[in-house]
């Protein structure tokens, strides 16, 4: 009988011939194997154990100092035609890309083990799910993949039925930034990542497969792979409705996905159920509505700034079974990061492995951080107290609303609703965020980030907008599309909206709109709430502040329109005419004060 795993085995042999590992170990998903790998990693210094009473099952990892974030400049979409990668991606021809990377992979695993990780993104066996196999020489990658995906022997059963899988090859190689490449070959269903050990570059099931490769497959197969959270909102009646939300980095997406209702609304009986905090795969079901799953099994979240106020639910989640990366190690075997609860520790070992104390400075006067600003935790979703009971449902959850957002000091009101799906796609295509102090670049500079997919779309973004329009036509009951801005400021630079749990007040209005329970004000940019329709029980916000939050400034919007025109110009003829038309209509409405 034909060996059903022949294609997989041939590929593994080819990669082994290239990378020359000393041995090959298959990851079976067992607890015993995980513990063995952890022990080995303690011995090599890849991992450090933490206090097993205070943080059971938790470990610490430090990356190389020049390898602390996704390297967008070294990330490529390798399609035969440059046009298919589009104007927002780095492109390399597949032949040249394979050649360049092969030279770095050659012999890179000598003296090391190659681990074979079969994994499923999404519940194993669900029509949504995709299978991948990652080959890596990093135990840290294996242990992270065991949290972030469904990895192990069970996946092979499904590969025997349907041999298609994404081929993911990773090697730390020399961790040399000069020899680092993150390559995507959508036409070959293949990812090659070399020279990095940082999560976003090396946990190939996450951004690389679940967004870049999946977005390409989704277009071909008529579904959507989006950079979105998924959450359920249980209303006082007991009914749960689900929303998906796209926000650029540093906009509080993870915090929103597990928000704790403020007292005023908790008393009414609201409760939040978390399905996912980063990625949504969505398809049209037989009822004509959009259904979504979270393909991931864990959270890979940013530690600094996470505390009992910003995210009390996550603070409970990461008490056990968590891998902490690039945080401060305290004397008592626990961890700390800037913006954590409680007192700043007097000393510790910082993310660079240096002895650290508060107020420490580099020679050039820059402050030395305890944790790197992009320090992370990797933690299983099942440990989240608000985890949705539908996490594993093969058909996912029905999406009532899509919310899009950005960090804008002015311009965008707290909330508005698009007129219809096509207008909503335009709102998504023009999404933008202003840089915060924590991000590289000029403070306050506007970065356009359509659907928060700019770094993650695996093909031409003009075609991606067209795909959204097609998906709208395929749905009998499309979700409504909203835009939120939690970050609007007054003239003195003070943020007007309290954010965090209070955001539920805005979500309540969104659901009321979806359920046709409230009227709205039609404006030039979309539908806005009437102030009296936002439930402010227990929150003391003066009416004129609310008015400011919902204000539309004509001058600002005219400036925005010019900036959008400039952005759209780069798409040339790939920008769908419907999107161009929406821009023309917006300009017309703003100019005529409608
Ligand atoms: C992430 C990101 O790491 O969006 O999730 O940058
Ligand atoms: Mn993300």
Image (cartoon, rainbow, N blue to C red):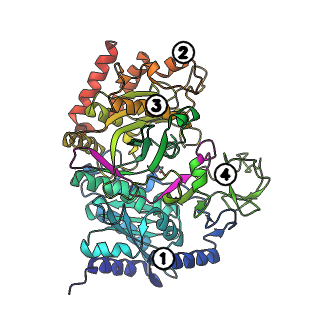
**Is 330 above or below relative to 15?**
above
Q: Position of residue 562 (x, y in %)?
A: 36, 25
Q: CA distance from mark 1 to mark 3?
A: 43 Å
Earlier-in-chain disc, 4 versus 1: 1
Q: Indicate yes or no whether the magenta region holds residue 426.
A: no
Q: CA distance from mark 4 to mark 1?
A: 32 Å
In the picture provided, is 581 more to the left or to the right than 413? left
- Residue that numbered label 3 is attached to: 506
SS label for mark 3: helix
The one nearer the camera, 126 or 41, is 126
Where the N terminus falls, by quadrant?
bottom left
Beta carbon at label 1 within 8 Å of ligand 1: no
- Residue that numbered label 4 is attached to: 337
Q: Which is in the foreground here, disc 3 or disc 2?
A: 3
- Residue that numbered label 2 is attached to: 544
Beta carbon at label 3 within 8 Å of ligand 2: no
- Residue that numbered label 1 is attached to: 30
Earlier-in-chain disc, 4 versus 2: 4
Earlier-in-chain disc, 2 versus 1: 1
In the picture provided, is 236 more to the left or to the right than 585? right
């Amino acid at each position: 009988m034909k060996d059903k795993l022949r294609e997989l085995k041939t590929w593994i042999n080819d990669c082994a011939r290239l990378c020359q590992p000393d041995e090959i170990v298959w990851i079976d998903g067992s607890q015993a194997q995980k513990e063995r790998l952890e022990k080995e990693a303690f011995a090599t210094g890849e991992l450090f154990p933490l206090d097993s009473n205070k943080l059971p099952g938790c470990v610490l990892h430090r990356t190389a100092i020049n390898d602390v974030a996704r390297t967008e400049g070294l990330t490529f979409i390798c399609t035969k035609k440059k046009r298919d990668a589009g104007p927002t991606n780095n492109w390399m021809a597949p032949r040249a890309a394979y050649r360049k990377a092969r030279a770095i992979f050659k012999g890179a695993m000598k003296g090391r083990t190659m681990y074979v990780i079969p994994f499923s993104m999404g519940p194993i066996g669900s029509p949504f799910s995709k299978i991948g196999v990652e080959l890596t020489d990093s135990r840290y990658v294996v242990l992270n993949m065991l949290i972030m995906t469904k990895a192990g022997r069970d996946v092979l059963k499904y590969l025997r039925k349907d041999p298609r899988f994404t081929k993911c090859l990773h090697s730390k190689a020399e961790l040399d930034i000069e020899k680092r490449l993150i390559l995507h070959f959508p036409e070959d269903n293949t990812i090659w990542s070399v020279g990095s050990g940082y999560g976003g570059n090396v946990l190939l099931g996450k951004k690389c497969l679940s967004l870049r490769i999946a977005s390409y497959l989704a277009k071909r197969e008529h579904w959507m792979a989006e950079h979105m959270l998924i959450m359920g909102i249980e209303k006082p009646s007991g009914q749960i409705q689900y929303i998906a939300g796209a926000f650029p980095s540093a906009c509080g997406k993870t915090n929103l996905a597990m928000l704790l209702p403020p007292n005023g609304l908790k008393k009414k009986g609201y409760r939040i159920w978390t399905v996912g905090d980063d990625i949504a795969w969505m398809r049209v079901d037989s009822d004509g509505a959009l259904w979504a799953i979270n393909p991931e099994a864990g959270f890979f979240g940013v530690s600094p700034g996470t505390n009992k106020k910003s995210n009390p639910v996550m603070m409970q989640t990461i008490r056990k079974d968590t891998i902490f990366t690039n945080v401060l190690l305290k004397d008592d075997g626990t961890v700390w990061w800037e913006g954590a609860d409680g007192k700043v520790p007097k000393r510790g070992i910082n993310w660079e492995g240096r002895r650290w104390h508060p107020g420490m400075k580099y020679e050039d006067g820059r402050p030395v951080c305890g944790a790197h600003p992009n320090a992370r935790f990797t933690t299983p979703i099942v440990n989240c107290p608000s985890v949705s009971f539908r996490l594993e449902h093969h058909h996912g959850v029905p999406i009532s609303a899509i919310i899009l957002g950005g960090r804008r000091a002015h311009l965008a009101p707290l909330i508005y609703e698009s007129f219809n799906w096509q207008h909503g796609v335009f709102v998504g295509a023009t999404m933008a965020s202003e840089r915060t102090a924590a991000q590289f670049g000029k403070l306050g500079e506007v970065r356009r980030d359509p659907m928060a997919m700019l770094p993650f779309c695996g093909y031409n973004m003009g075609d991606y907008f067209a795909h959204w329009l097609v998906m709208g036509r395929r749905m009998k009951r499309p979700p409504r599309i909203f835009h939120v801005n939690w970050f609007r400021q007054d003239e003195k630079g003070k943020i007007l909206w309290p954010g965090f749990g209070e955001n539920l007040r805005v979500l309540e209005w969104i659901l009321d709109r979806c359920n046709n329970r409230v009227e709205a004000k039609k404006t030039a940019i979309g539908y806005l709430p009437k102030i009296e329709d936002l439930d402010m029980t227990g929150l003391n916000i003066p009416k004129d502040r609310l008015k400011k939050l919902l204000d539309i400034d004509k001058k600002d919007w005219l400036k925005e329109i010019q900036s959008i025109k400039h952005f759209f110009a780069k798409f040339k003829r790939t920008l769908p005419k419907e999107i161009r038309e929406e821009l023309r209509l917006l300009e017309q409405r703003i100019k005529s004060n409608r």
